[in-house]
C-alpha cells in the first residue's frame, strides 16, 4: 500500500503513441520506476484523457494518424486549462526541422528514438522538478498576495478606526542619546486627526517628527518625564490635564508602554469637567448655606458646633487655650414688642454684621476666629489660641462696637439704645473633658452679667 502511494506521488505520466508495442515498453519501464502511467494511441483519445485526469507530463510521438503530435501539442497549448502541461516529444525523427517544429508547436523537450531509459527519466524528472517548483512558487505568490490583501485590509481597517475615533490616538517612539541612552524626545509614529487637532497641526506635519517635548514645554514640562517613566518602567499613566484648545479645555489620557515608546489615547472631557466643577461649586454653596444663618448671614449653630469640636481636639493636642464669648441682646423681647418683628430682624442683622466685621477687621483678622448665631438673640464668638485676658479685651471692644451703633431702644430697661450682655470663658482643652464644658462656663458668665445689671461682661474660667 505504501509502495503504491510512493509511485503515485512520483508523477502522473500520459504516453501518446499509435504503436502499442512502444507504449507497452515505455509504460512498463516507467511503472517499475514508480510513475503512474496512462497510455493512448491517438491524439483524439489523448485530448479526452487529459480532460478526465490532468497529467503532470505528456510523452508524445509525432507520427500518428488523423492528428499528429504537432497538432495535438498545438491543440493543448491553445486550451487555457492545459497549456501549462509540459509536452516532451519522443520520436524517431532526427532532423533539425522536426525538432524545431516540435518546439514551435509548444514542446518543452525532444527525445529521439531509440531512447535510453535513463535519458527519458532524467528529462522527465527535470520537468517534474520544474513543475513542483512552479507550484511552490505559485503557492508562495498566492500566499503573499493573500497576506498583502489581509495586510492592506488591516491597514485600511486600522486607518478607518483611527480616523473615525472620537478619541485621540497616537504612538510615540523614544529617541535616545547615543552616548548615554537617555530618552531625549519622542518621534510620532501614528497619529489620528483628533490628536493632530489638539497639537494644532496636520497629521503630515506630525508623523515622523519630534513634536512632543516642545509641545509639553508650553503646557506642563513635568509631564515629559512621566512619559519617559512609562517607557523605562512599563507602568501605565492615566490622568486629567488642562489645555485650552478651541472649545475644549480638559482632557483625559491613558498612556501605556509600546516597544521602546508608548501609545496614548486622549479623550475630551471638557463637558464632564465643567459638570464636575459646577457640581463642586453647587456643593460648596450648599455647604455654605448649611452652615450659614439665613437672617444674619453669619455662621449658624451647626457650623459653631463643628468648629468647636475640631478646635477643641486641636488645642488639646497643642495644650493651648480656647476662649468663648456668649452674648445676647438685652431686653430684645421688649424691642420686638415695641418696634415689631421686622425691625427686630433688622436689629439682629445689624448686630451680627457689626460684630462679624469687627472680628474680621484687619487689626483683628484671624481666620480661625468664628462669629456665629447661637439661637434667637444669642451669639457666640470662638477664639482659638486666646487666653482669658485676650478674650476679655475682645468682649470689651464688642460692647463698645454695639454702643457705637446707637440703635434706639426706647422701651429698654437698661439704656435708650440697644445693648448686649456678654459671658466670657477660657479653658485649655483636654480630651477627658467635653467641649460643651466651655459653653456651660460662658453661659454661667453670661448669667452673671445679666444678674449684675446687663450691658456688661462677666467672665468664668
Image: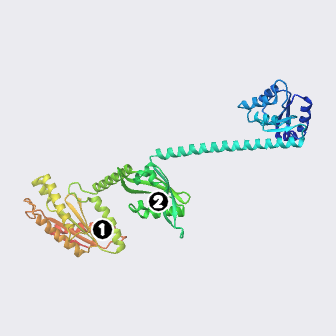
SS at mark 1 in the image: helix
Of badges 2 and 1, the one in the foreground is 2
x, y (%) of residue 188?
49, 56
Residue closest to the eye, 45 or 359: 45
Q: Position of 13 compared to 177: left or right?
A: right
Q: Is residue 58 visible to the viewer in this orientation of the structure?
A: no
Residue closest to the eye, 342 or 275: 275
x, y (%) of residue 344?
14, 55
Q: CA distance from mark 2 to mark 1?
A: 68 Å
x, y (%) of residue 20?
90, 29
SS at mark 2 in the image: loop
Q: Is 104 situated above or below 336?
A: above
Query: Mark 2 Cα within 10 Å, few/some/many (few <14, many 20+)?
Result: some
Residue closest to the eye, 393 or 16: 16
Q: Is residue 161 visible to the viewer in this orientation of the structure?
A: yes
**Labels 2 & 1 near each other (Cβ < 8 A):** no
Q: Is 318 situated above or below 12?
A: below
Query: Mark 1 Cα within 10 Å, few/some/many (few <14, many 20+)?
Result: few
Whichever of callouts 2 and 1 sits on the residue coming sooner in the sequence is 2
Looking at the rendered structure, the number of numbered marks drawn on it comes to: 2
Say which quadrant the C terminus sits in: bottom left
Q: Residue at x 34, y 75 (%)?
A: 319
Mark on residue 381?
A: none
> What residue does disc 2 label?
210
> What residue does disc 1 label?
437
Which image quadrant for residue 138?
top right
Q: Position of 175 compared to 119: left or right?
A: left
Q: Position of 41 compared to 450: left or right?
A: right
x, y (%) of residue 292?
26, 57
Amino acid at each position: 500500500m505504501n509502495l503504491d502511494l510512493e509511485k503515485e506521488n512520483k508523477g502522473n505520466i500520459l504516453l501518446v503513441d499509435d504503436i502499442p508495442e512502444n507504449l507497452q515498453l515505455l509504460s512498463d519501464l516507467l511503472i517499475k520506476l514508480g510513475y503512474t502511467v496512462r497510455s493512448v494511441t491517438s491524439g483524439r483519445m489523448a485530448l479526452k484523457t487529459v480532460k478526465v485526469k490532468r497529467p503532470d507530463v505528456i510523452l508524445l510521438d509525432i507520427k500518428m494518424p488523423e492528428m499528429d503530435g504537432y497538432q495535438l501539442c498545438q491543440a493543448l497549448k491553445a486550451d487555457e486549462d492545459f497549456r501549462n502541461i509540459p509536452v516532451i516529444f519522443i520520436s524517431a525523427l532526427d532532423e533539425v526541422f522536426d525538432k524545431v517544429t516540435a518546439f514551435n508547436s509548444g514542446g518543452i523537450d525532444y527525445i529521439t528514438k531509440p531512447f535510453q531509459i535513463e535519458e527519458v527519466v532524467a528529462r522527465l524528472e527535470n520537468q517534474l522538478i520544474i513543475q513542483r517548483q512552479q507550484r511552490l512558487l505559485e503557492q508562495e505568490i498566492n500566499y503573499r498576495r493573500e497576506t498583502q490583501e489581509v495586510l492592506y485590509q488591516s491597514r485600511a481597517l486600522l486607518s478607518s478606526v483611527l480616523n473615525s475615533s472620537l478619541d485621540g490616538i497616537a504612538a510615540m517612539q523614544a529617541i535616545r542619546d547615543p552616548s548615554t541612552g537617555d530618552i531625549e524626545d519622542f518621534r510620532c509614529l501614528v497619529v489620528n486627526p483628533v490628536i493632530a487637532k489638539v497639537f494644532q497641526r496636520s497629521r503630515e506635519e506630525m508623523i515622523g517628527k519630534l513634536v512632543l517635548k516642545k509641545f509639553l514645554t508650553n503646557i506642563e514640562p513635568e509631564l515629559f518625564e512621566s512619559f519617559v517613566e512609562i517607557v523605562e518602567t512599563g507602568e501605565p499613566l492615566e490622568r486629567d490635564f488642562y489645555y485650552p484648545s478651541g472649545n475644549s479645555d480638559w482632557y483625559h489620557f491613558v498612556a501605556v508602554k509600546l516597544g521602546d515608546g508608548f501609545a496614548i489615547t486622549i479623550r475630551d472631557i471638557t463637558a464632564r469637567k465643567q459638570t464636575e466643577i459646577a457640581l463642586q461649586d453647587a456643593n460648596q454653596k450648599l455647604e455654605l448655606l448649611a452652615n450659614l444663618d439665613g437672617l444674619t448671614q453669619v455662621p449658624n449653630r451647626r457650623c459653631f458646633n463643628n468648629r468647636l469640636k475640631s478646635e477643641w481636639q486641636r488645642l488639646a493636642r497643642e495644650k493651648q487655650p480656647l476662649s468663648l464669648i456668649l452674648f445676647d441682646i438685652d431686653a430684645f423681647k421688649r424691642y420686638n414688642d415695641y418696634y415689631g418683628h421686622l425691625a427686630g430682624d433688622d436689629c439682629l442683622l445689624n448686630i451680627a454684621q457689626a460684630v462679624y466685621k469687627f472680628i474680621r477687621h484687619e487689626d483683628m483678622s484671624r481666620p480661625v476666629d468664628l462669629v456665629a448665631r447661637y439661637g434667637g438673640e444669642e451669639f457666640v464668638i470662638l477664639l482659638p489660641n486666646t487666653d482669658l485676658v485676650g478674650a476679655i479685651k475682645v468682649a470689651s471692644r464688642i460692647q463698645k462696637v454695639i454702643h457705637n451703633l446707637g440703635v434706639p431702644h426706647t422701651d429698654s430697661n437698661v439704656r435708650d439704645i440697644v445693648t448686649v450682655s456678654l459671658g466670657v470663658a477660657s479653658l485649655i482643652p483636654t480630651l477627658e473633658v467635653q467641649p460643651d464644658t466651655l459653653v456651660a462656663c460662658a453661659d454661667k458668665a453670661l448669667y452673671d452679667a445679666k444678674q449684675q445689671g446687663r450691658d456688661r461682661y462677666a467672665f468664668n474660667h
